[in-house]
Each structure stands twice: as C-alpha cells, then as structure tokens.
C-alpha cells in the first residue's frame, strides 16, 4: 500500500515528528510514503480541521500523530518498539495532548515529566528510537516556547531531557526530516517571491514587526475590514512579529461594549487571533496630556467657530478668527471644553498646521471635541475626546506599532499623521497603504448597511446577502478562500470594483473535494413515476458520499419502484427515449401522462440497467418515494442592488432589488436529515449548499445556495428578469443550475416591505 503524507509548513509546531517516522518507514520500504509539504497552517481545506499533518491511502486517512504513527508501524514495526507498544502508544497520546499547549505552566509540567522519565533511559521506550521519540522530539523542536527555554535557560529543563533531545536531534533520520522541511520552505519562498506577490514591508526586521487592526466598536465587520484584519495578521506572522487588536473607542455616541464582543466573534470567524487587545481609551490620560503639550507648544488652538462656517473657511483657505489666540487663552478655553461649559460645548481643538495647504487634510484638522455622552469604559471622567486623526498616530507610537496599515483613501492624511508625531516628538511608524476593496452590486458603508437592516430589506447583519463577515460566512464562504483571495490582492494600489466571481470560484475549489453529494427534488409539480423492473419493496444500499473522496464515507440510497422526479426533467422526456437515472442506471420512458395545464402528472419507466449511460443525453436525479425523504427548503439569493456601481447622487432606494430571496420547497434524500448547522454539501445538478437551519418540529431544514463563481450563479437575477439584455452566458451554462428552476417565491418579509402583499 502506498501513502501520501501531507504536512502543513506554517503550522506551529510543524509536524516534524511524523516526517521522521515516515522517513523511517521509507528506509524499510522505499517510497512507501510520498511526503508533500503545503504552505498552510492546518489542513482544514483537505477536510481535517486542526490537523497539521494528514496521512492518506486510497481508503484510509489519519490525522493525529498517534494514528499516523500506528499506520506507519504497519510498514516498519520498530516504530512501535520491540516489545511494549503500549508504552509507545501512551507517549504518543502524551505528545498529542500535552505538548501542543501554548500555556507555559502546562508545558513546564510536561517537560518535568519527560525529564524524569528519561533519567535512566536513552530512548522513550526500549533500546532503540520509536515513533514516540520522533513525535515528542518534533513537538519540542517546533515549539517556540521550548526553543526559547532550550536556548536561554537549558538548565531549567533538567539534565536528562536536553541530553535525550540532543541525541535524537543528531540521528540521521531526524536530520533528514529537518532538511526536507527546510528545503520545502526555501523553494516555496522562492516561488512566491517570483509570483504575484511583491508583498512585503519596508523597514521590517524579522521578529520586530508590530501591526495593529483598529476597528471602531460601532458595528459588525464587513469584507473590507476583513481585508485590513487579514493583511495585518499576514505581516505579523510573516515577520514573526506582534499583532494588536485595538478598539478605537473615541466616540461614545456611536460605540457600545456589545460591539466589541461581536467584532471579536467576527474576527474569530476569519481566524484572526485576538490575543493582544487594547483600547484607545486606555490612553485617554496620556492623550489629554499630549493635547495640553501641543497647545503649550503653540501648535494647536481652541476654535469656537460654528461648524458650517468652519467648513466654508477650510474649503476656501480662510483662517479662523481663533487661530492666533495666546497659549494662555487656549489653555483656558480647553479647560472649558473639558468642563463642557456652555462656551466649551461650542469649541473644538484644532491642530495649527496650515490654512490653505493644497492637501485639505492639512488645513487645521480638529483633534479634540466635546461629547457629554458617558463613555462605555471611562464613564463621565472625560467630556472631551481625541479624534481619530490625533489619537491614532499617538497610540500607534506608544504601542510600538512599526507598520501602520491603512487604505490608500487615507493617503492625503499621511502627512498629517506624521505632523502630529513631529509636533509631539514621538517615534514614527511606517505607513503601508493598501487599496480599499469594493465589489459590484455591493455597499460597504456602515450607514447604508444599517439602512437596509432598519428598512427590513434584510433579516439582520448576518443576512446571507450582506457583505459582512457574518453574512458571507453564512452563505458558505470559507476562511481559507477569503484569506487566499485577500493575500492575492496583496499590495495592489488600484481601487477596483471587483466582481464576486473569483472569490466564490476560489471557495468552490476548496469545498468541492470535501462536500458530500446528495440529491434534492423540487416539490412543485413533482412527478411520481412507476419504475418497471425495480424492487417492489424498498432496498437500501450504501453509496459513497463523494465518488472521488472515499474518506467522506457512505450514505444510504433507497431504490424502489416508485420514484420522484422533477417536472422540469420529465416534461422534456419522450416516450421510448432512453435516459439515465443517476447512481442507478438506464431506463426507457414508457408512458407520460399530462394534466389539463400541460404538466406531466405521472410517468412510467422501465429499467434497462445493461444500457450504456454514455449514450444517453439526459442524466436525471430522482428520489425513492416514501416516508424517509427529507423535507427541505432551498434558499437562493440575488444581489441587494440592481446597479453594479452606485454613483454619488444615486438614491439607494431606487436601486433595491425588489425580490432578492427565493425559496424552493424540496425533497432530499434521507441522509440530509443527519446534517448539522454549517455543513456544506453539493446537491447533484443544483450546486453547493450550506445548512443554515436544521429541521425542528414541523419546520423543514433550510439550505442556502453557495455561489460557485460561474456566470450563471453570479449574474444579477433582477437585471436578468427585466429581460432586456439577459446574459446569454446564464442560459447557455445553466441547464441544471438552480436559479432557472427557482420558484421565485418572494420572502414574506420582502413582500411586506415593498407593500405588494
Ligand atoms: C473647570 O472645573 C473645575 C472643577 O470644577 C474648576 O475648578 C475650574 O475653574 C473650571 N474651569 C473653567 C474654565 O470653567
Ligand atoms: C404547470 O402547472 C403550473 C402551476 O402549478 C402552471 O403555472 C404551468 O403553466 C403549468 N404548465 C406547464 C406547461 O408548465
């Protein structure tokens, strides 16, 4: 039997121990294991969530170090030791359970246990190296915590653990394993250098980069935020640096503590670690001191000009009447702001940069304003709050941020960012611009999305039609696809309006190999067919859930002499035509009965299992008729907007898609009853679906269609329905796709909102 071992090279720790075990097996039986390194953190995309290595044969799959070792021991039994394989087994469990922790205390206990065990031993078990030695060695070698202790405080590990570790590290097998990994990482680095990504940071030192993602806790994250978050994470990881999640909570009128929790949840959905969490409000005292300092240096003044006048003056390059107040007068006025006196409430603090700089961001921007709404952390301690323009550069500097990532819409504000730091004599981070992400038919403005929620056009912030992280995850987007897509965009500075198709196509590539196949039949006008030659009592057979991926296991398919087929299929049949019943075989159409509307009301088929399925034109889905079929509702969605790109003066209300949710009540094979929330499947000839709600009581399960990036699934259906320029692509490529068959039942909600009820 031959195996493939896939190892994720960005895992922490990398599964180096199984590589050594595999090399050991290969030494006994050359090329028994083909070792493949992939640049990923885990092998979720291969269907093994959390696993960092995966051993596959044609019929088996193992994901833990222990299971992989046991499988490899079938090739080289010495991996389990000469006599006492139980002991090896126990230590493999130990490695899986206790050496992967990030908690220093837990690890320290594990190291002590190892040191004690190795007191009188050269190997973990017996008198020669076993899988236990390799796996434990690999876990230690790949652990940042162990490496650190080993380098700086070796003595604290005891005498025997380091001695054993050095001995195992010096074996030819472990040596080869390390080399193999290193080589794969070098070639990967080379090929990605040459490739599309000229994505790197200036002034970046390995181990010293600090990035931060600074969301305002005032809403939910959308795909644009996800880009910023993932890029920050990408660089922090690439340079082995630090990643800060900073809540930019400087506006108490808009922010709530609940939003922090929802943002953390959203970040968890895209795999962003929220390990270091800070708040701009942590620095209010310091920021206040910096405000006093900047006033004292004569570089800021308190302006009581009303907003409209101020806007005009800034536009026209006219100085404010307050611009030349003395420092004393400014300090007194700032105290009035701080006290929120009647006069203070009319004021704001402005940086004294320029009256008429060509860059309008430099025209004396506001840096502090009054707000009497209590802050969710600092309560009423302050009635003055710094603006983003003032707080962001200062907090970046204080927190040691080396690289501040921002979208290039802020580029005009970069000189202002540096001006603040110069004015206060603070260290300057490097700004790294990237382009904002835009999609066709999609709004990313928080205010406009809120409007959709308030109007009831969507069911909430997690509506599958929404470009929020919640929305797209609910619609079946995987983290892996989102990450790959965003890194692919990389450093591009072009603000493009992107089509959704590439993102969904990428997603399809990831789910296709692992999505179990099932069958669904649309309920409306379903046709009951008699099948001559079929078993009169239902027969249940095991069939693979995925023909190319046997690891997914089997499902049960029922065969009987009464089956359900879709009206759309049967209405194309001709009497005596030979067709193929998918996963069954060929049959002749013997009879077709139609009702007064011209719909097929029943049909009769005769099995012809010896017939060649390559010769039939129609391969159709069917379900055995009986109590066991599952009741489901298929949901499909359209864009919320009818126009690809809204212009400045377009009113959103004029471009809301009248009906953007379609529900199709259907039957599905009984196996679908066992699916869980969030499971992704393919319904044969319909496409990919994610289980949004499992059945409860009499409510059927609901499955949401996952776009696959093909033109048919990406076209705006609303535009299509207008008829005018119906994209030919849709018709041509969509004979089996869902939208064509969709019943276009408007959701009650949409009807209500539009008053068509
Ligand atoms: C601000 O409030 C403090 C404390 O109540 C008071 O001592 C001070 O005089 C006030 N200053 C101004 C300018 O209103
Ligand atoms: C079939 O029945 C539906 C009503 O369920 C009707 O709308 C349709 O026109 C009928 N005829 C054909 C040929 O589909």
Image (cartoon, grey):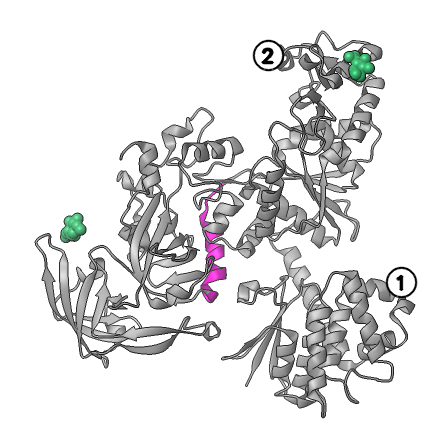
Residue 389: which quarter of the image? top right
- Residue 130, x across and y down, in percent: 73, 84
Q: Are marks 2 and 1 in contact (CB under 8 Å)?
A: no
- Residue 315, how many percent across, how many down? 62, 15
Q: Main secondary structure of the magenta part?
A: helix
Mark with earlier residue (2, 1): 1
Task: Give the x, y percent position of residue 475.
Answer: 45, 51
Can you tell which mark lies on residue 152? 1
**Going by the image, does 193 lie left or right of 290?**
left
Does the magenta-highlighted stretch encompass residue 542? no
Task: Bin the neighbour count of mark 2 within 10 Å (Cα to Cα): few under 14, some 14-19, many 20 and up.
Answer: few
Position of the C terminus, as image quadrant, is top left
Confirm whether residue 366 shows in the render.
no
Residue drawn at (34%, 33%) of the image: 753
Between 387 and 298, the residue placed more toward the observer is 387
- Tell me: is circle 1 under 8 Å from ligand 1: no
Residue 526 higher or lower than 21, as above or below: above
Can you see residue 288?
yes
Q: CA distance from mark 2 to mark 1?
A: 62 Å
In x, y percent, where is residue 637?
37, 46
Residue 308 — which label?
Answer: 2
Quadrant of the image where one finds ligand 1:
top right
Note whether 269 is above or below 360 in the view shown: below
Q: Which residues are magenta?
A: 497-514
On-image quarter of the N terminus: bottom right
Decide: is 269 above or below 436: below
Observer-nearest of 394 and 195? 394
Figure check: 255 above or below 599: above
**Circle 1 sits in a helix, a strand or a loop, which is it?**
helix
Which residue reaches farthest front?
A: 697
Residue 353 or 374: which is nearer the viewer? 374
């Amino acid at each position: 039997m031959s195996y493939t071992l896939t190892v994720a090279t960005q895992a922490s720790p990398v599964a180096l121990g199984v590589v050594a075990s595999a090399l050991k097996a290969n030494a006994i039986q050359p090329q028994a294991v083909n070792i493949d390194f992939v640049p990923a953190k885990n092998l979720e995309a291969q269907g093994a969530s959390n696993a960092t290595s995966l051993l596959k044969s044609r019929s088996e799959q193992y994901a833990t170090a222990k299971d992989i070792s046991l499988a490899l021991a079938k090739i080289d039994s010495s991996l389990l030791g000469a006599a006492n394989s139980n002991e090896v087994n126990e230590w493999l469990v130990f490695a899986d359970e206790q050496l992967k922790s990030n908690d220093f205390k837990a690890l320290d206990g594990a190291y002590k246990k190892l040191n004690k065990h190795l007191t009188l031993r050269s190997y973990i078990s017996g008198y020669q190296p076993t899988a236990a030695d390799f796996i434990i060695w690999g876990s230690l070698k790949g652990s940042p915590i162990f490496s650190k202790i080993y380098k700086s405080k070796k003595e604290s590990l005891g005498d025997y653990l380091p001695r054993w570790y050095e001995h195992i590290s010096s074996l030819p097998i472990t040596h080869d394993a390390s080399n193999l990994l290193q080589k794969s990482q070098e070639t990967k680095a080379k090929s990605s250098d040459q490739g599309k990504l000229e994505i790197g940071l200036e002034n970046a030192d390995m181990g010293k980069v600090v990035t931060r993602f600074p969301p305002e806790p005032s809403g939910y994250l959308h795909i644009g935020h996800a880009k910023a978050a993932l890029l920050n994470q990408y660089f922090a990881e690439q340079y082995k640096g630090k990643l800060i999640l900073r809540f930019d909570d400087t506006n108490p009128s808009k922010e709530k503590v609940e939003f922090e929790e929802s943002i953390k949840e959203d970040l968890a959905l895209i795999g962003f670690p929220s390990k270091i969490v800070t708040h701009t409000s942590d620095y209010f005292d310091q920021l206040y001191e910096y405000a006093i300092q900047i006033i004292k240096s004569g570089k800021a003044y308190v302006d009581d000009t009303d907003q409209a006048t101020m806007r005009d003056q800034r536009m026209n390059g006219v100085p404010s009447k307050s611009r030349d107040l003395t420092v004393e007068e400014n300090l007194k006025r700032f105290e009035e702001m701080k006290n929120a006196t009647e006069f203070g409430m009319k004021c704001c603090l402005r940086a004294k940069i320029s009256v008429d700089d060509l860059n309008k961001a430099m025209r004396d921007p506001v840096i502090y304003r009054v707000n009497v709404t209590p802050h969710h952390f600092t309560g009423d301690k302050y009635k003055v709050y710094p603006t983003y323009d003032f707080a962001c550069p200062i907090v970046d500097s204080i927190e040691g941020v080396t690289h501040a990532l921002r979208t290039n819409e802020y580029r005009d504000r970069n000189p202002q960012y540096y001006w603040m730091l110069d004015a206060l004599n603070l260290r300057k981070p490097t700004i790294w611009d990237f382009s904002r992400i835009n999609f066709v038919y999609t709004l990313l403005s928080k205010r406009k999305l809120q409007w959709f929620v308030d109007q009831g056009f969507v069911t909430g912030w997690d509506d599958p039609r929404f470009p929020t992280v919640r929305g797209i995850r609910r619609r079946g987007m995987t983290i892996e696809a989102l990450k790959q897509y965003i890194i692919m965009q990389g450093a591009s500075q072009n603000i493009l309006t992107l089509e959704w198709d590439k993102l969904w196509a990428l997603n399809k590539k990831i789910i296709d190999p692992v999505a179990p196949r099932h069958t669904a039949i649309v309920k409306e006008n379903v046709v009951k067919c008699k099948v001559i030659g079929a078993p009169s009592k239902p027969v249940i057979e095991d069939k693979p859930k995925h023909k190319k991926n046997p690891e997914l296991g089997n499902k049960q398919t029922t065969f009987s002499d009464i089956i359900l087929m879709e009206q759309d299929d049967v209405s194309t049949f001709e009497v005596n035509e030979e067709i193929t019943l998918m996963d069954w075989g060929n049959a002749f159409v013997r009879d077709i009965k139609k009702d007064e509307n011209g719909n097929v009301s029943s049909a009769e088929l005769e099995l012809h299992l010896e017939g060649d399925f390559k010769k039939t034109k129609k391969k159709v889905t069917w379900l055995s008729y009986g109590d066991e079929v599952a009741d489901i509702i298929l949901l499909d969605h359209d864009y919320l907007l009818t126009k690809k790109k809204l212009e400045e003066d377009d009113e959103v209300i004029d471009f809301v898609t009248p009906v953007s949710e379609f529900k199709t009540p259907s039957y599905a094979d009984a196996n679908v009853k066992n699916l869980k929330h969030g499971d992704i499947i393919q319904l044969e000839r319909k496409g990919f679906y994610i289980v949004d709600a499992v059945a409860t009581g009499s409510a059927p399960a609901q499955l949401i269609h996952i776009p696959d990036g093909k033109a048919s699934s990406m076209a705006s259906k609303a535009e299509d329905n207008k008829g005018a320029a119906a994209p030919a692509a849709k018709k041509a490529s969509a004979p089996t796709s869902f939208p064509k068959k969709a019943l276009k039942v408007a959701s009650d909600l949409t009807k209500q909102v539009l008053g068509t009820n």
